[in-house]
Image (cartoon, rainbow, N blue to C red):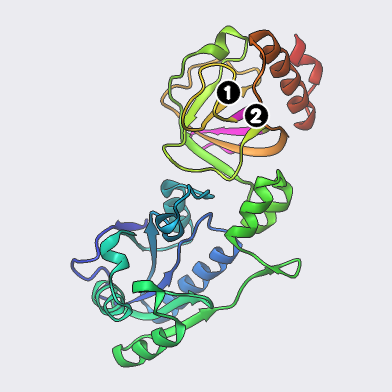
Amino acid sequence: MTRLSRDLAGPCLAPEGSVVAIGAFDGLHRGHQALLAEVRIRAQALEAAPAVISFEPLPRAYFSPEPVPRLSGVREKLKGFAAAGMSHALLLRFNEALTAMSPEDFVRRVLVERLAAREVWVGEDFRFGHKRTGDVAMLERLGGELGFITRVMPPVLLDGARVSATRVRALLASGEFAGATPLLGRPFVIEGKVERGNQLGRTLGFPTANIQLRGRVSPIGGIFAVRVGLGEAPCSWPGVASLGLRPTVNQVAQPVLEVYLFDFEGDLYGRRMAVEFVAKLRDEQKFDGLEALTAQMHDDARQARELLGMNPRLAEA
């Protein structure tokens, strides 16, 4: 179980000492997984606590004037930390106070006082502190003065190129889900709780389960063949999904994920759902009316069934 803390100040979270990884960890791809695995191994060897420091909102989103796509939400990130065996997660609020903190203060207040760090693991391009003035060399120098060792994790390569969140986002945005899966170490999934919508899909013969993204900007959009997991079940139930603004009827200001589960009967409201994206069918588009929209939805369902290994004729039954 991972203990979550949000505050800069407070008592020491790991009196026995800790081995710490620092990063944004968007998507927890294979590079992140390798880093956390090293932290866990070193913590066991030193009889210390494996810990991770991350930030919300993501630093790049905080500084960007435009919405920034992200691969995972906070809940998914924390689940990933727990799966990686981290005993402590310090999820710092990335705000004006944190950005104004000098590198020296960050090291003393967070790494030393809050986590009693014995080893600190970072990527080779790690920067920190006010105006990103801290780097690996400074972290090594401060560690020598304050009693911890800095370890630099080499990049994880796949097909000769570095595994990175930027690379994963680019593949997903292009609809290349099969290409993104090896980098993530798993299929791309969006999770959320099913909420009530306007039930238009029900009147068109396609009752959908709706998931609000709550301001999270997804790297993908359009119509997709998907597999769905309910609760803690694996993603195995076939379906077709739309992620976008619904431009034809009742357009919304923020993208919503709408999922139609093939041959499903039951009430999904309030249940947690994980949606695995298998293939992109098309971009979202505006139709002249409900008749044209419904015809396209039937065609989308037929294509999705075929891609998912089902009988496409059932979409017309």
Q: Could you say which is closer to the camera, residue 157 or residue 34?
A: 157
Residue type indicated by callout 1: Pro
Kindly identify the residue that appears in the image at 46 percent across and 19 percent down. 197
Give the residues in magenta. 226-242
Using the rendered image of the protein, determine whether residue 236 is visible from the camera's viewpoint: no
Residue at image point 28% right, 61% down:
96
The reply to whether the C-beta atoms of the residues labelled 1 and 2 are less than 8 Å apart is yes
- Which x, y percent locates residue 41? 49, 74
The mark nearer the N terminus, 1 or 2, is 1
**Horizontal and vertical percent position of residue 35:** 52, 70
Helix, strand or loop at mark 2: loop
Q: Quadrant of residue 218?
A: top right
Q: Position of residue 19 (x, y in %)?
A: 39, 75
The residue positioned 57% from the left and 42% from the top of the image is: 189
* Distance (Cα) linking label 1 and label 2: 8 Å
Dot 2: few (<14), some (14–19), or many (≥20) neighbours within 10 Å?
some
The circle drawn on residue 284 is 2
The C terminus, quarter of image: top right
| Residue 235 in magenta stretch | yes
Instruction: Work out whether 166 lies above or below 238.
Output: below
Q: Hey, which residue is sitting farthest front in the picture?
A: 65
Q: Which residue is mark 1?
A: 247
Instruction: Answer left or right for 311 relative to 96.
Output: right
Q: Describe the element under mark 1 as helix, strand or loop.
A: loop
